[in-house]
Amino acid sequence: MSAQESVAVSSETAQQTPIAQKKRSAEERYYYASQRELIWWRFTRHKAAVFGAVVLIVLYLCALFADFLSPYSMDTRFEGYQAAPPTPIHWIRPDGGFQPYIYGLQRKLDQKTFKWIYTEDTSKLYPLRFFVRGEEYKFLGLFKTNIHLFGVEGAPIFVFGTDRLSRDLFSRIWAGARISLSIGLVGVFISFTLGVILGGISGYFGGVVDDAIQRVIDFLLAIPGLPLWMTLSAALPRDWPTLKMYFAITIILSVLGWTGLARVVRGKILQLREEDYTLAAIGAGASDWRIITRHLLPGFTSHLIVSITFSIPAMILNETALSFIGLGIQPPAVSWGTLLQDAQNLTAVAQQPWLLIPALFVIATVILFNFVGDGLRDAADPYQR
Amino acid sequence: MANHTQEPLLEVRDLKKWFPVSKGFLQRQTGFVKAVDGVNLDVQAGETLGIVGESGSGKTTLGRCITRLYMPTGGKIIMRADGETMDVSALKGKELSAFRKRAQTIFQDPYSSLNPRMTVLQTVGEPLLVNNVAKGKELEDRVTEIILQVGLRVEHLQRYPHSFSGGQRQRIGIARAMVLNPKLVVADEPVSALDVSIQAQILNLLLDLQQKYQLTYLFISHAMSVVRYVSDRIAVMYAGKLVELGPKQELLSHPKHPYTEALLAAVPKTSQRKRGMRLVSAGEPPDLANLPKGCVFVSRCKYAAEICQEQAPVLRPLGSDSFVSCHLAESLTLQGI
């Protein structure tokens, strides 16, 4: 408990003590701490989890402000810059001053390999500027603006290079992040709703209902996931608009996703239903509704959050896999999976390795989610004897 | 069945609680575990009836049927309080709620009996809140009053269970049982999870509260030493049945059932003189899903005769105020303490 002494006390717990401010010891604070605060304290001690949570929040914010963050829109083509490598950014000017700048690119065709060779044209430098005016977009869908975080006037800047259709990969990755990162949340939300309701019914009422739901889960778990998703998404009309497609794919991914959660919920309810404090609430005359909402559900919300944290990355991976084989999100919509489609053939990977950068984002996101999940699990477990 | 002129507070008649046993893939029901099987007893207002027996003898199940935490499989429980007569196993809705205000339970495990996510105020106040007895400031006042009674302090109100010791947690559990001002309190092994030094404090607290509020206790324990400290009468349970029931002194000094004798022999002795006479009752209690035809204790009874194998004894009066369920009770001279 001593390690909690270093943690700052929240203002609302402080008010409840009549004792003078200075005398209040850390132990005292611990006594008045709710379960949520205890979990939070333990979570903040888990360095990797805190790091993961912070970086994930930054990632999600970047996805949210993708239009502002990226210098170009995801569909802008730069004629003459097909499959260009990442633009090198220079920091020290030839005359010695500090300023980030780039050179323009020249290309010529290699007559032997028929590959475009890009070289820097060092005759003129283009300074990197912040809050520049560029292409117009709608900021968060609210109002029109044309200010981008950074940009270069006079020459294009490709932080992560371009694809074969000469579009800026950096801008496309952030556009793709919107779909890839949010599909995990939306999909898990659907799985979560299904899982909690069906698992809850299964655990609380038991009997025939329980048996029926458990057999359905057994059946769903026995279906190999990828072929089922492929069949279902192949059955979707190709001409659906992006948004409709997006939700259809989410639902397809959630069809199998809820089973694990339903099992967790059922197990927890079965366990907590036998706790003496549940019996005591029955003995006190509490209604079914109060028992479920006050005594059963709060007992495993921390567990739910942990399983959700672990199922989001699984959902992201599934979307990426489906989109990669061409059955998930369809172009012109962009997700990390569709971006990786460009890296499907060996020559592309060998000659334009920057096309694999979206994979790094997928890997990083999954690892970060697992860090956070680990931290949450460690923080939530000790009180679930 | 008792000789008292006054009507008993609680009458339990032929009470049964059978748990179904199911097996196999299709969950076919293959039988019952007869946790409580035909129990008869009366509890007088204001007395403490101790119920003693080993683990699995059905004590807890009996207590939970009486407070309607479990629905009995068969038999009757009649409770008389404030001029009303209630058939406990048939209660529903409002009447059940009225009954719950009069019969409360103290649980054995002070750790699992408190919701870790609720403060003392919320836990102790819950019975008041769900029965619409009090809320807001009034609820807080009543909770404060009761937690002072059980030896906690006002500043404990906003704390969560993890900040309390086992003994303090049990005090919270007692406060929750007492806050509705019940008539009958079923204390289900209230001290067996506590240190010996704390046990005495909690037992004395229970006795104080009984005096102050004229409570009737059904005190369940596996430890004869605890039961004899608090009880007026003692009932001995074995394999879901009552084997002996009698006033404390009579039962302790002149046990009438061989199982009672064995239990008494297991009580730790304090004087040198009495040591060395330990009577060990070897063997295991019978399988509750598959009870023997005759007496349930026959396999462990050193006095067993042929009739014990063949015929199940019934609880019958013997002497003044005592009841025993043994064919040979009259002919045995058993050792008490």
Image: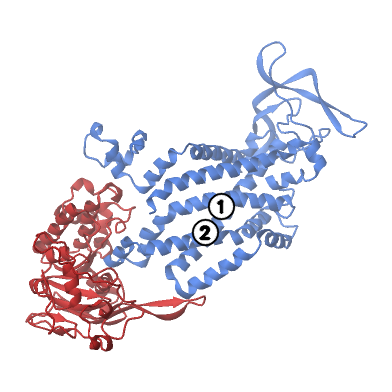
Q: What is the quadrant of residue B36 in the picture? A: bottom left
Label 1 lies in what chain?
Answer: A
Residue A89's place in the image compared with B170, above or below, is above
Which one is nearer the viewer's eye here, A199 or B65? B65
Q: Amino acid at mark 2?
A: Leu
Picture disc at residue A375: none
Q: What is the quadrant of residue A143 in the picture? A: top right
Chain coloured red in the rendered structure: B
Task: Identify the colour scheme used.
Answer: by chain
* SS label for mark 1: helix
Q: Are marks 2 and 1 in contact (CB under 8 Å)?
A: yes
- Name the residue beneath numbered marker 1: A311
Left or right of A267 on screen, residue A170? right
* SS label for mark 2: helix
Label 2 – label 1 distance at C-alpha? 9 Å
Left or right of A38 on screen, residue A54? right
Left or right of B158 on screen, residue A361? right
Badge count: 2
Q: Quadrant of the C terminus of chain A?
A: bottom left
- Which mark is first along the chain, 1 or 2? 2
Visible residue check, residue B90: no
Position in image of residue B61 (x %, y %): 28, 72
Q: Residue furthest right?
A: A111
Callout 1: few (<14), some (14-19), or many (20+) C-alpha neighbours within 10 Å? many
Residue B99's place in the image compared with A69, above or below, is below
Position in image of residue A29 (x %, y %): 30, 40
Residue A360's place in the image compared with A197, above or below, is above
